[in-house]
Image (cartoon, rainbow, N blue to C red):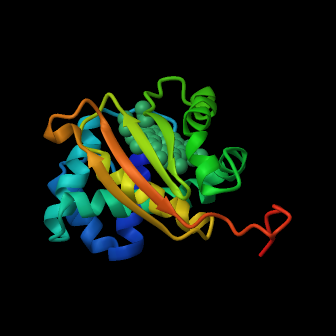
Amino acid sequence: MYGLVNQAIRDMILVNHGEEIWAWVRQRAELEVDTFEGMEPYPDDLTHRLVMAASVELHDDPHALLRAFGEFWVKYTAAEGYGPLMDMAGSSLPEFLNNLDDLHARVGVNFPQLVPPSFDTEEHDQGTMHLHYHSSRQGLAPMVIGLVEGLGDRFDTPVEVEQLASRGEGADHDVFSVRYEPPQTSPGGVIEQP
Ligand code: HEM
């Protein structure tokens, strides 16, 4: 994955746990570098090693870490200059979830070796959406849960995410139910500004 992802994991550990813990994680993951080039691709194995090393050093479950990382990523990318790309993807949670593939297609303009995930959405009930996640990588479903929660924060929309099908348990791909509070509409059907 591109260095931007590894750099974000590093920053999350530094911000939440400080230099000393990061040094231990680095050592355990057998990293030869202290920082990553955001625009350079790195082997996926390095990202995997980072997550596993952080999980040991922080005494935290890798799933919990990936989930926290997903949430962190939404703020991190916005702060690292990708805010306008995020803005283009939509102004509400459901609209944004519908546009995730377009978002990564735009990201791919600057990251030519990007191997992005792919998402499909299905309107289930009023306020519930099914999110289908396809990836060439295994094991990142918990990150998707955190990402959707982070997007809920971004849009000030309370959200509950539940995994309905899991590749780890033999399903063809991961599926999530995303229950969100629909934006308030006035009787005239106009979305009220907060
Ligand atoms: C402007 C914001 C974003 C940028 C710049 C961005 C960029 C990236 C990059 C560089 C990767 C690594 C892939 C690779 O190197 O081949 C990635 C992976 C990923 N992105 Fe995004 N992304 C953004 C927003 C999002 C959002 C909002 C979601 C929400 C679902 C998301 C879901 C994922 C997932 C799940 C992966 C893991 C790769 C996989 O599943 O195969 N991204 N993204």
Residue at position x 34%, y 43% in the image: 175
Q: Please indicate whether residue 58 sits to the left or right of residue 106 in the image.
A: left
Q: State which quadrant residue 135 falls in.
A: top left
Residue 54 lies, with reference to residue 175, above or below; the image says below
Residue at position x 20%, y 65% in the image: 24
Q: Nearer the viewer, residue 49 or 180?
A: 180
Residue at position x 33%, y 57% in the image: 162
Residue at position x 50%, y 40% in the image: 121
Is residue 17 something one can see in this rendering? yes
Q: Nearer the viewer, residue 34 or 152?
A: 152
Is residue 72 something one can see in this rendering? no
Q: Position of residue 104 (x, y in %)?
A: 56, 35
Q: Please indicate whether residue 74 sits to the left or right of residue 156 in the image.
A: left
In this view, which residue lies farthest toward the top?
Answer: 112
Residue 149 lies, with reference to residue 131, above or below; the image says below
Q: Position of residue 141 (x, y in %)?
A: 30, 47
Q: Position of residue 59 (x, y in %)?
A: 15, 71
Q: Position of residue 19 (x, y in %)?
A: 33, 72
**Screen quadrant of the C terminus:** bottom right
**Screen quadrant of the N terminus:** top left
| Marker count (numbered) | 0
Residue 66 lies, with reference to residue 170, above or below; the image says below
